[in-house]
């Protein structure tokens, strides 16, 4: 009986901490605009990366994908909805920023 419980615990833990499905897929914002991006990370540290390299987070309040920003040790939405066109690159989270953040974790 103990072996069964231990086996089920290990299996459930492995499934819970599985990495994101990291293949290109289509996402949709609340207004119906769509774009293609790749999910990255796992259940604790996750984001999506667009084909143009932008890092996005889903905002559960607005139901939109927004540019990500680093706050502490997390990536959070910055309030600017991604529409497939980049206007100001100084406010955009880049891959180099993610590498620095992951080193802190």
Image: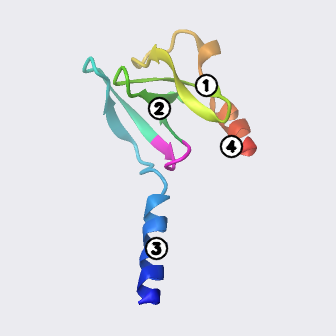
Q: Say if residue 62 shows up in the picture.
A: yes
Disc 4 or 2, which lies upstream in sequence? 2
The picture places residue 13, in percent across and down from the top left corner, at 48, 66
Asked if labels 2 and 4 touch by Cβ distance under 8 angstroms, the answer is no
Considering depth in this image, is 84 or 102 the residue closer to the camera? Answer: 102
Residue bearing the label numbered 3? 9
Q: Say if residue 54 shows up in the picture.
A: no
Residue bearing the label numbered 4? 102
Asked if labels 4 and 1 touch by Cβ distance under 8 angstroms, the answer is no
The picture places residue 11, in percent across and down from the top left corner, at 44, 73
Image point 44% across, 15% down: which residue? 85
Considering depth in this image, is 105 or 3 the residue closer to the camera? Answer: 3
Which residue of the protein is positioned furthest toward the left in this rendering?
Answer: 32
Residues at marks 1 and 4, CA–CA distance in whole angstroms: 13 Å
Image point 61% across, 25% down: which residue? 93
Question: Compared with residue 67, is residue 87 higher up or lower down, i.e. above or below?
Answer: above
Q: Coloured how?
A: rainbow
Residue bearing the label numbered 1? 93
Quadrant location of the N terminus in the rendered image: bottom left
Asked if labels 4 and 3 touch by Cβ distance under 8 angstroms, the answer is no
Name the side, left or right, on which 16 lies relative to 68.
Answer: left
At mark 4, the secondary structure is helix
Question: Compared with residue 20, is residue 4 higher up or lower down, i.e. above or below?
Answer: below
Q: What stretch is highlighted in magenta?
A: 39-45
Q: Dot 2: within a 10 Å radius of its alpha carbon, few (fewer than 14), some, or many (20 or more) residues?
A: few
Residue bearing the label numbered 2? 51
């Amino acid at each position: 009986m103990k072996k069964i419980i231990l086996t089920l615990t290990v299996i459930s833990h492995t499934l819970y901490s599985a990495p994101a499905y990291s293949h290109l897929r289509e996402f949709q914002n609340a207004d119906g605009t769509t774009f293609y991006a790749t999910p990255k990370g796992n259940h604790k540290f996750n984001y999506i990366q667009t084909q143009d390299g932008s890092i996005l987070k889903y905002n559960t309040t607005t139901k939109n994908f927004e540019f990500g920003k680093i706050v502490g040790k997390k990536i959070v939405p910055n309030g600017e909805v991604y529409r497939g066109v980049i206007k100001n690159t100084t406010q955009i989270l880049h891959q180099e920023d993610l590498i620095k953040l992951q080193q802190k974790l």
